[in-house]
Image: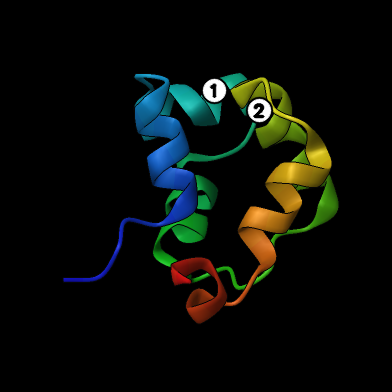
Amino acid sequence: MQPMPVLARLRGARGLSQRKLAQLADLTMETVSDIERGATRKPYPSTIRKLAAALEMDFDELATLLTEEPDEAAS
């Protein structure tokens, strides 16, 4: 079984649905879903900034988590 994507873990830890995170970040639910599924390989910095604010996280920390390679995240 593959590990849960970073954004899904962070969102779940805060008790947020994809819809609620999308609303808080002023993004579409499709964008949140694409990032969680890995369909969006490296999100735009403006998207990461919005997600970081919605998740009450540091931009640099979230950017690192979302842009590292899958095998790097697993180690």
Residue 26 badge: 2
Cβ–Cβ under 8 Å for marks 1 and 2:
yes
Q: Dot 1 surroundings within 10 Å: few (below 14), some, or many (20 or more)?
A: few
In this rendering, position of residue 65 left or right of residue 75 = right
Give the total number of marks visible in the rendering. 2
Taking the view exactly as shown, the residue that stands out farthest to the front is 75
Say what secondary structure mark 2 lies in: loop
- How far from the left and from the top, in percent, is residue 44? 78, 58
Residue at image position (73%, 24%) is: 53
Viewer-side residue, 44 vs 75: 75
Q: Dot 2 surroundings within 10 Å: few (below 14), some, or many (20 or more)?
A: few
- Amino acid carrying label 1: it is Gln
- How far from the left and from the top, in percent, is residue 62? 69, 45
Residue 48 badge: none
Viewer-side residue, 33 vs 64: 64
- How far from the left and from the top, in percent, is residue 56? 67, 20
In this rendering, position of residue 25 left or right of residue 59 = left
